Image (tube, rainbow, N blue to C red):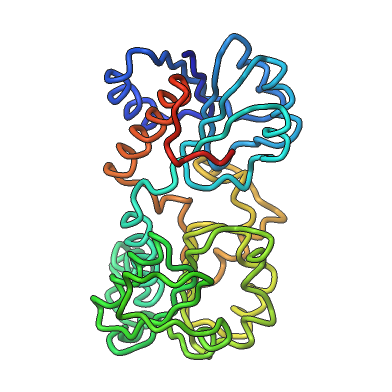
C-alpha cells in the first residue's frame, strides 16, 4: 500500500519512519505541503493519504482525492471535524483516526496551562530574565480545596480529573455519559458546574451541540475570578464573547491550547507576520491569558502511539480487517 503524508513535520517523519520498519507492506512518502484542494491531486498514484487536524479534508478535497483513486484517509489525530464524512462515505472512502494516543499528555498540558496562567509563570519568566525580581503582578491562588469543573469525562477528561484530585481539589463534572471509573467525581448540571467551579477545563468533542459552548450566556453564569482552560477544540469557545468576559474581569486567568483562529497559525512560524485583524493578537494582549500552539499532545509517548495506531489502521484496511478506529 502506498500512502502519501501531508503537512509532514520533521518529528512526524522521524517517528513514522522508525515505526514503519515493522510494516514492510506499507510504503510512505512525505510532503511538507498541507492538504488543501490545490494539493490533493498530488495523491494520484497512491492508495491512501494521511492528514492531520489542520488539514482541509472538505468536500472539494475529497472529490479530488476520489478522482485520484484514494480509498483511505488516515487521520493521525483524534478529531475529524475537518473531514466531510458524508462526502467520503458517499464516494466509498474509508476514514480512520487515532482516538486515544495519550490522554495523559493532553491532561498534563491542561494543568500546566492552568498553573501557568494562575501563578503568572509566563510573566515571572520574562521579569526575571530582565533582572526584575519583584513580585508585582504575580499573585495567584491555591488550587488546594478549590473546585475543578471538568466538561467531558472521556479519557482526557478523566485524566484531568485525576490530576485535579491529586492537587486536593474537589472535582465536579458534566457529561451526558457518566464515567463509572471516576467514583470521586460528582456529576452535576452544566449550570451548576459553571456556578461552582474555580477552574473549568474543557475536554469534550466539537459537535453541533457543543459549538460555542462557552459564550456570553454561559460566561455570565460562571463564578467571578474563574480560570478557564481549553485543550480540546477552538470552536467550543466563542472567542469574541470570551474577550468581552476577560475585559469585564470575569476571569482570573485563561489558558488556551486551541482557539477558533488557529487554522492559519497551528504549527507554523508567523513571527514575521503582522496580524492586523487577528483575534489571537487581541487575546495575547491580556496579561492573564496564556496561549500555546496546539501542543497538548506533543510528547514522545504520544507520537509513538500516533505512529503505531495510524500504521495499524492502514494495515487493517489493507487486509480487510477492522480496528474500532473507523469513523466510516
The correct choice, above or below, for 295 with respect to 29 in the image is below
Which residue is located at x 32 percent, y 61 percent? 108
Residue 52, image x, y percentages: 52, 37
Residue 213, image x, y percentages: 63, 70
Nearer the observer, 275 or 298: 298
The correct choice, above or below, for 38 with respect to 159 in the image is above
Which residue is located at x 62 percent, y 48 percent? 81
On screen, residue 135 versus residue 255, left or right, reads left
The correct choice, above or below, for 183 with respect to 210 in the image is below
Which residue is located at x 49 percent, y 85 percent? 188
On screen, residue 209 versus residue 197, left or right, reads right
Residue 44, image x, y percentages: 63, 12
The correct choice, above or below, for 234 with respect to 61 in the image is below
- Residue 82: name its quadrant: top right
On screen, residue 44 versus residue 127, left or right, reads right
On screen, residue 2 versus residue 85, left or right, reads left
Residue 56, image x, y percentages: 65, 36
- Residue 126: name its quadrant: bottom left
Query: Where does the C terminus fall, quadrant-wise?
Result: top right
- In this figure, what is the number of numbered marks? 0
Nearer the observer, 251 or 197: 197
Amino acid at each position: 500500500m502506498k500512502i502519501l503524508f501531508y503537512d509532514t513535520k520533521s518529528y512526524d517523519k522521524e517517528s513514522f519512519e522508525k515505526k514503519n520498519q515493522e510494516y514492510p507492506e506499507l510504503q510512505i512518502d512525505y510532503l511538507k505541503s498541507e492538504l488543501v484542494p490545490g494539493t490533493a491531486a498530488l495523491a494520484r498514484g497512491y492508495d491512501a493519504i494521511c492528514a492531520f487536524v489542520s488539514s482541509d479534508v472538505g468536500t472539494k478535497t475529497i472529490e479530488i482525492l476520489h478522482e485520484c483513486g484514494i480509498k483511505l484517509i488516515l487521520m493521525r489525530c483524534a478529531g475529524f471535524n475537518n473531514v466531510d464524512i458524508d462526502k467520503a462515505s458517499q464516494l466509498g472512502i474509508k476514514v480512520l483516526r487515532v482516538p486515544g494516543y495519550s490522554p495523559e499528555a493532553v491532561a498534563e498540558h491542561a494543568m500546566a496551562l492552568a498553573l501557568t496562567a494562575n501563578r503568572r509563570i509566563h510573566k515571572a519568566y520574562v521579569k526575571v530574565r530582565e533582572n526584575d525580581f519583584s513580585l508585582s503582578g504575580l499573585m495567584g491562588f491555591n488550587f488546594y480545596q478549590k473546585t475543578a469543573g471538568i466538561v467531558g469525562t472521556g479519557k482526557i477528561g478523566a485524566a484531568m480529573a485525576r490530576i485535579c484530585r491529586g492537587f486536593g481539589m474537589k472535582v465536579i463534572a458534566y457529561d451526558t455519559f457518566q464515567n463509572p471509573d471516576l467514583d470521586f467525581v460528582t456529576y452535576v448540571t452544566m449550570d451548576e458546574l459553571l456556578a461552582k467551579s474555580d477552574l473549568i477545563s474543557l475536554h469534550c468533542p466539537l459537535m453541533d451541540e457543543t459549538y460555542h459552548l462557552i459564550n456570553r450566556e454561559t460566561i455570565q453564569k460562571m463564578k467571578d475570578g474563574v480560570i478557564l482552560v481549553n485543550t480540546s477544540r477552538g470552536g467550543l469557545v466563542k472567542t469574541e464573547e470570551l474577550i468581552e468576559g476577560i475585559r469585564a474581569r470575569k476571569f482570573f486567568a485563561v489558558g488556551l491550547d486551541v482557539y477558533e483562529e488557529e487554522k492559519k497559525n497551528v504549527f507554523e512560524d508567523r513571527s514575521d507576520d503582522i496580524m492586523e485583524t487577528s483575534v489571537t493578537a487581541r487575546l495575547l494582549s491580556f496579561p492573564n491569558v496564556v496561549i500555546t500552539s496546539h501542543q497538548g499532545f506533543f510528547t514522545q509517548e504520544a507520537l509513538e502511539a500516533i505512529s503505531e495506531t495510524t500504521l495499524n489502521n492502514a494495515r487493517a484496511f489493507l487486509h480487510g480487517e477492522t480496528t474500532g478506529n473507523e469513523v466510516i
